Amino acid sequence: MKTPLSSSSSSSSSYIIRKARLSPYLFTLLAFIVFVAILYGEDFICILGQLDSISSDTRPISTTSEFYKNREKLPFAIGRTGTEEEGCDVFSGRWVRDVSNRPLYEESECPYIQPQLTFNATLMLETLRGKRMMFVGDSLNRGQYVSMVCLLHRLIPEHEKSMETFDSLTVFTAKEYNATIEFYWAPFLLESNADNAVIHRISDRIVRKGSINKHGKYWKGVDIIVFNTYLWWMTGLKMKILKGSFDDEEKEIVELSTEDAYRMAMKSMLRWVKLNMDRKKTRVFFTSMSPSHGKSIDWGGEPEQNCYNETTLIEDSNYWGSDCRRSIMEVIGEVFRGSKVPITFLNITQLSNYRKDAHTSIYKKQWNPLTPEQEANPVSYADCVHWCMPGLQDTWNELLFTKLFYP
């Protein structure tokens, strides 16, 4: 603790200050500092607020805040949304009915919807002119991809668009715009024994460590990329990880906790982005886990029921389904916060948790004939993982649109 100044020292200090002459150069510098503080004071406060939130917030965040700290403009951005600290979080809120503006398209209008599955489409297409946009991940990301195509395709004349599939890659081409919107099947992002885009129902799933380039070579050159991966990791508490190659006669396989295995994949993804995406010209998004509604007891329903026949939303704002592992969200937050790679986190989990009414349920094509037992019990074959279209995933794309143009 400093000792109080004596009266003599206080007097001496006052005397020196009174006698000191202020240099004109110093006066000019001080005036300039005051001017800058007044002009940019609000920005400084905002930056300091973001720094504080990054150090204290334990939730997954968008690392695009790094750009705002450096006053860099993100590619494709034409403005910005408010931050959560400013009272604006576009991923948080409640659902309201909008019968005047929804749906954004009719199912019969979009031929790209597969049998199991306020948006400025003009701005989006013009932005994609001469560019590639790609969704990479599992069938839920494929659903978001199809939703994006459905939102845009009706602005394109029939003879100016096409949809083609090449093994794991599906490409929608808007010829007039010289643009493509693509989907690449890679449910783990890394190489796995479930990489066949058609035949991949494998219960004993194995992921190869350090293998992201196996798929990543097909992602190079894209301008906007949207990753997802979650559902396929949920095989239990452990995941089998292959060291070496799937071609090795004797395979070295180890087991990791699901969280550690998922962390490995996230770090591999960020390394690939750092090495292959130009942060000044491209944008990278990661979509959080898509919830399922397979246990009605989660929302206070009857035992042994699921999303079948559900027609209302979950009203509890704190609802979190048992199928959504918080530990995985924590891994995402940990890895993203520890990286300087610019990636925008699309946190669709909580808002989707409320929509037990939005799944395809029994209203989809069944690839195998139903048994008499199944027909007698629709709950047994209701799909409570995938989403109807038009529907929830259009909202995901509206949020993607918002964060693309207004980070």
Image (cartoon, rainbow, N blue to C red):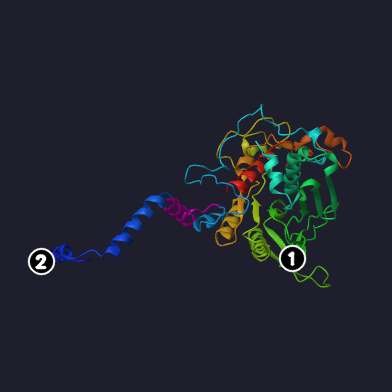
Disc 2 residue crowd, few under 14, some 14–19, many 20+, Cα 10 Å:
few
Crowding at label 1, few (<14), some or many (≥20) Cα neighbours within 10 Å?
some
Among the 4 quarters of the image, the one containing residue 73: bottom right
Residue at screen point 57% across, 62% down: 340
Residues at marks 1 and 2, CA–CA distance in whole angstroms: 74 Å
Residue 258 relative to residue 49: left or right: right
Is label 1 in a helix, a strand or a loop?
helix
Residue found at x 79% / y 46%: 176
Task: Return the disc, 1 or 2, that comes first in the chain's sequence.
Answer: 2
Residue 372 visible in this rendered orientation of the protein: yes
Give residue 366's position: percent from left, percent from top.
85, 40
In the displayed orientation, state which residue is furthest to the top. Answer: 100
Which residue occupies the foreground of this view, 274 or 24?
A: 24
Q: Which residue is mark 2?
A: 8
Q: Amino acid at mark 1?
A: Asn
Per the rendered image, the range of residues in magenta is 43-59
**Label 2 SS:** helix
Could you tell me residue 290's position as x and y percent?
Answer: 67, 46
Q: Is residue 56 magenta?
A: yes
Residue on which the image places disc 1: 213
Residue furthest out toward the left: 8
Q: Amino acid at mark 2?
A: Ser
User: In percent of the image, x 85 and y 49: which residue is there?
Assistant: 164
Up the image or down, 248 lies above or below 349; here it is below
Query: Of the residues tagged 1 and 2, which is closer to the observer?
Result: 2
Q: Is residue 136 magenta?
A: no
